[in-house]
Every structure is written in structure tokens, then in C-alpha cells.
């Protein structure tokens, strides 16, 4: 599970670099799910809240994010 967490963290970093808000939200949601499965509920909540905040920001700006991951 640690390897998956590392891959997802790198993916999140890349999405932030290219300013891909949809991908950033998805990566945060995926990391939240990984931490949830590890029983690290505070970390899971942190990442899932980040994903939700990005999605809300996108809606506020008139963008239509997908809702399949988060």
C-alpha cells in the first residue's frame, strides 16, 4: 500500500504542476481512499476535504467537474 501511496503522491504533485484541478481533486480523493483503507482516518479526511474543496471551487467558477472519484 505504501508503493501505491507514493505513486499517488507523485501523481498529485504532477497535477498541481500542470494546474489540472480535476486531476488534483481526483488524486486527493484517491489518496483519501488509500489512507481510509489503512485506518488513518485523520489523513483520509484531510485529503478528501481537499478534493471536495477543489470540486466546490470548480463549481463556483462555473466549471462542471466529474463526480466519479470524489
Image (spheres, grey):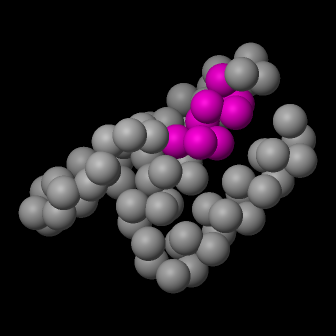
Residue that sits furthest to the top in the current view: 39
Magenta span main SS: helix
Residue 70 spot, x, y in % from top left: 42, 38
In the displayed structure, 70 sits above or below 58; it is: above
Residue 9 lies left or right of residue 70; in this view the side is: right
Q: Is residue 11 magenta?
A: no
Q: Residue at x 54, y 72 (%)?
A: 16
Which quadrant holds the N terminus? top right
Image quadrant where residue 10 sits: bottom right
In the displayed structure, 34 sits above or below 11; it is: above
Residue 28 spot, x, y in % from top left: 55, 48
Residue 46 lies left or right of residue 65; in this view the side is: right
Image quadrant where residue 47 sits: top right
Residue sitting nearer the eye, 7 or 50: 7
Q: How many marks?
A: 0
Q: Identify the magenta region.
A: 29-36
Q: Residue at x 71, y 22 (%)?
A: 37
Residue 5 lies left or right of residue 54; in this view the side is: right
Q: Residue at x 30, y 50 (%)?
A: 66
Residue 30 spot, x, y in % from top left: 59, 42
Q: Is residue 31 magenta?
A: yes
In the displayed structure, 30 sits above or below 10; it is: above
Residue 57 spot, x, y in % from top left: 25, 56
In the displayed structure, 15 sits above or below 1; it is: below
Q: Residue at x 63, y 74 (%)?
A: 14
Amino acid at each position: 500500500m505504501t508503493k501505491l501511496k507514493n505513486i499517488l503522491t507523485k501523481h498529485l504533485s504532477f497535477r498541481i504542476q500542470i494546474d489540472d484541478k480535476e486531476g488534483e481533486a481526483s488524486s486527493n480523493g484517491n489518496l483519501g481512499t488509500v489512507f481510509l483503507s489503512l485506518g488513518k482516518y485523520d489523513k483520509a479526511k484531510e485529503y478528501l476535504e481537499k478534493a471536495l474543496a477543489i470540486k466546490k471551487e470548480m463549481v463556483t467558477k462555473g466549471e462542471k467537474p466529474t463526480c466519479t472519484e470524489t
